[in-house]
Image: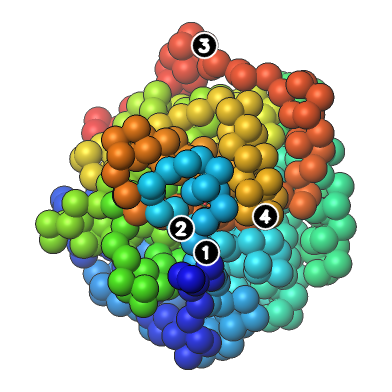
Amino acid sequence: MSETKILLSESEIPKHWYNILPDMPTPPAPPLHPGTGKPLGPDDLKAIFPMSLIEQEMSPEREIAIPDEVREIYALWRPSPLFRAKRLERALKTPARIYYKYEGNSPAGSHKPNTAVPQAYYNKDAGIRRIATETGAGQWGSAMSLACQMFGLECTVYMVKVSYEQKPYRRSMMATWGAEVIASPSNRTNAGRAILAAHPDSTGSLGAAISEAVEDAATRQDTNYALGSVLNHVLLHQTVIGLETKAQLAKIGEKADVLVACVGGGSNFGGFTFPFVRDKAHGDRVRIVAVEPKACPTLTRGSYSYDYGDVAKLTPMMLMYTLGHDFMPASIHAGGLRYHGDSPLVSQLVHEGVVEAIAYHQNPVFDAAVTFARAEGIIPAPESAHAIKGAMDEAVRAREAGEARVIVFNLTGHGHFDMAAYDNYFSKKLEDFELPQGDIDDALKNLPKTGA
Ligand SMILES: Cc1ncc(COP(=O)(O)O)c(C=O)c1O
């Protein structure tokens, strides 16, 4: 019988992260300063990031060594297992071989600690005492709280209000690891107060929470900011996922025909797929599919333009797919996929045709999540269920074509804190929200004019 779990030993935890920058098909467009509109230099980011992370953000090196202190903490849950989804294959009656990389066994329950831990490490190393950050669904905030606790840093998390109210136990988790959690928009920052003045009932957005955390960090000497997605160094840290997956597939003599991952800001997608994108550049025919929600269709309906990463226009402008920095997504349950923009690297790969992008409504995504849970046991996070739906559709197409394709997807986290969303699904309360074109057109009217 073939193995169900393909495992690596701790000595096989990657020793380097893979930096895709030197291997991008064309050189990435530079981020621009939010005030001057000029290309950003390392010094422009010094107020909120340590220099080691700024260097990683722009590094031309293909491999960047993972510090021993970080590998030691990674060893608490890494290498993560690659599963063969045999029971799902049977349920779908597909000749395809389906594999999933499972990141839900980290202490915080998702892939997010893969970058939270090195970010805390480099900040501690730079003499920083406190981290301010934001969280959408609570996964990133949990991961950063955990990582700060491990390196003795204080942590303040601005949590998007709708999640703060929907997910009280995510808050308790962050408190257990010693973090302070604030519902965003809040009265703690100018950005938060401005949003509340204009929209007193605002349920918040990731873009708004980022503004609050960046302002907090920029106005305090002892505090830096940490971002859980989008930026190059975050995707870099997440490449441990793809590097391990490659080693696991090689161990059993398999080669992926299609890779599928969900996209919020692009970190798990980039981390999982970039080591394979490199092979694709060298002639490999693997297809790479990004999945997002139809309620926040950044890659499938957004504009490929320079835009800010946050509502208050405090962050640099990046060339990416965007729905506009003041876009307020509907309160769908995949909270971690409600971001107006996307990683510039992932956006560029979609724009240049290396990566395909698709979008689903939340009811079919929950259908897939429940089918998966009943076959494989693991109850997935709603974000991860987007990748499951994408992989299942690929498996059905393989059945229709009568081809034993190898489908590999990234299962980013478990859904144990998302059971209220499952309840809403079971009681048929989930809406499939189709974003009106007028809303997108309105939000895109406020894109910055950069001349690019
Ligand atoms: C479980 C899970 N999967 C996926 C995502 C999407 O983030 P990213 O696109 O950065 O991987 C999130 C974000 O919070 C998440 O919590």
Q: What element carries label 2?
A: strand
Q: Would you call the spot at circle 2 few (<14 residues within 10 Å), some (14-19), or many (20 or more)?
A: many
Q: Residue at x 23, y 45 (%)?
A: 354
Q: Earlier in the sequence, mark 3 or mark 1?
A: 1
Mark 3 or 1, closer to the camera:
1
Q: Marks 4 and 2, Cα distance to the nearest angstrom? A: 14 Å
Q: Which of pointers 3 and 4 lies earlier in the amino acid sequence?
A: 4
Q: CB of mark 4 within 8 Å of CB of mark 2?
A: no
Closer to the camera in the image, 132 or 204:
204
Query: Residue at the location (63% across, 40% down)?
Result: 371
Residue on which disc 3 sits: 436
Between residues 341 and 79, which one lies in front from this camera angle? Answer: 79
Residue type at mark 3: give it.
Answer: Pro
Task: Name the residue beneath numbered marker 2.
Answer: 99
The amino acid sitting under disc 1 is Phe
Mark 3 nearby-residue class (10 Å; few <14, some 14–19, many ≥20): few
Q: Dot 4: within a 10 Å radius of its alpha carbon, few (fewer than 14), some, or many (20 or more) residues?
A: some
Q: Which of marks 1 and 2 is nearer the N terminus?
A: 1
Res 50 visible: no
Marks 3 and 1, how far apart at CA: 39 Å
Q: Can residue 129 be seen in this view?
A: yes
Q: In the rendered image, which residue does mark 4 sit on?
A: 378
State the SS at label 3. loop
- Looking at the rendered structure, the kind of residue marked 4 is Ile
Side of 319 relative to 100 (left or right): left
On screen, residue 90 versus residue 373, left or right, reads left
1 and 2 marks in contact (CB < 8 Å) = yes
Who comes first in sequence, dot 4 or dot 2?
2
Mark number displayed over residue 442? none
Task: Between label 3 and label 2, give the one nearer the viewer.
Answer: 2
Mark found first going from the N terminus, 3 or 2? 2
Residue 83 badge: 1
